[in-house]
Image: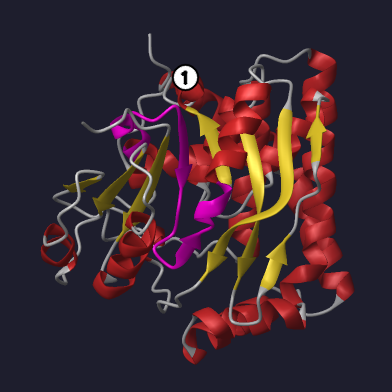
Amino acid sequence: MALPPKISFLLCTRNRAEVARQCVAHILSSSRQDIELIVRDNFSSDDTSALLSGIEDARLRLYSVKENQGTLSFFEIPKLASGEIITWISDEDDFSLDEIDFVLEKFRTNPDCNVMFGSVVVGPAARRLQFEEKTIDDPVRACITALSFSGCGGLFVRRSALPAAHAFRIGSPEQGYLFWNYYPVGFFASRCVSDKLITTSRTVVTQARFGRTTNNWSETSAPDRVRLPHYYPESTFDRLASNIANIFMKKMTVAQKLRASSSAVRLFWLQSPSFTNPELISLLKENYADRTVQAYVDHIGRRGMADRFGRFCWALKSTIRLAPAVVSNIKAWRRLMVG
């Protein structure tokens, strides 16, 4: 008899059949019977569904949607989970299966904690997203840490905390963009986090496969709508506006909201030099076609952001127009609240 799952692995994929198959095979190589793996195929045009349907394992559950829902898939897939703890994983990643007991024990011994981050290794150069071994018990720091998360794998959320994220009627990628920009997993972290957050230096996810990125999650359901990818300056501004709206929609004191918003703006300013950072360009070349990278470089040049003064001016202008953008986002959030 199958055991009730203690942890649910959530995989959203599109048009990377073999990459997804390898990811699924890795998770199911675990002998544990108290796990489940849920795959949501985001309207693939290749043989993803057929290939995964050939895998016989009671721990695997497959779902397909009838249109490309973009990042909305990440919002919908947790509704299918039944594990006590849920975690998202990219089809390019291998999860460190030996760390499952460690993760579960952390949640067991910290019943007042809903969110945990683990360290991640990404890219052919094995870059590390490294967390410290610590407990953050400052609500503002916990919120900002959650809002700053830009990945997929490495986040763990207590399923009982999900209603805080699912308290909105989000029905399209366009609506989703107002809530999480390109970072739905970070959205869940920020909505579900309590006053306490756990991080660990242990590596829980390693990128093991390198499917060429095609901006699947950037696409919209409206063919006449063009949205810039997540690494463009305009997208980082949109994310800042949605993050501050998120902060003001949380149950925090006014002082805490102001502190968190100030921290978010400061991080935005600190990020502005990175738009021409050689390391960013190198990372883009690892994941995108040369013409895509060159288009980004050309865009930065046209915006006058190739030098320090140009980036300063852009950040200043963005900060000046931030308040109206935040107010607009808050109004959208309130319109879409459940109840």
* Residue beneath disc 1: 160
Q: Nearer the viewer, residue 233 or 7?
A: 7
Residue 34 % position (x, y): 37, 36
Magenta residue check for 95: yes
Residue 9 % position (x, y): 40, 45
Magenta residue check for 107: no
What is the quadrant of the C terminus in the image?
top left
Q: In this view, does 155 lie to the left or right of 65?
A: right
What is the quadrant of the N terminus in the image?
top left
Decide: few, some or many residues near mark 1? Use Cα within 10 Å; few <14, some 14-19, many ≥20. Answer: few
Q: Which residue lies furthest to the right in this view?
A: 309
Q: Nearer the viewer, residue 136 or 293?
A: 136
Label 1: which secondary element: helix
Residue 328 appearing in the image: no
Q: Is residue 271 left or right of residue 332?
A: right
Q: Residue at (19%, 44%) from the top-left corner? A: 58
Q: Residue at (56%, 65%) from the top-left corner? A: 206
Residue 142 % position (x, y): 75, 32
Where residue 134 sits, quadrant-wise, is top right
Q: Which of 279 and 206 is in front in this view?
A: 206
Q: Residue at (29%, 60%) from the top-left corner? A: 224
In the image, is residue 36 above or below residue 139?
below
Residue 83 appearing in the image: yes
Q: Which residue lies furthest to the top in this view?
A: 339
Q: Residue at (45%, 47%) from the top-left corner? A: 88
The image's colour scheme reads: secondary structure
Amino acid found under the numbered disc labelled 1: Ser
Circle count? 1
Q: What range of the chain is rendered magenta?
A: 77-99
Q: In this view, does 17 lie to the left or right of 176?
A: left
Residue 295 % position (x, y): 54, 83
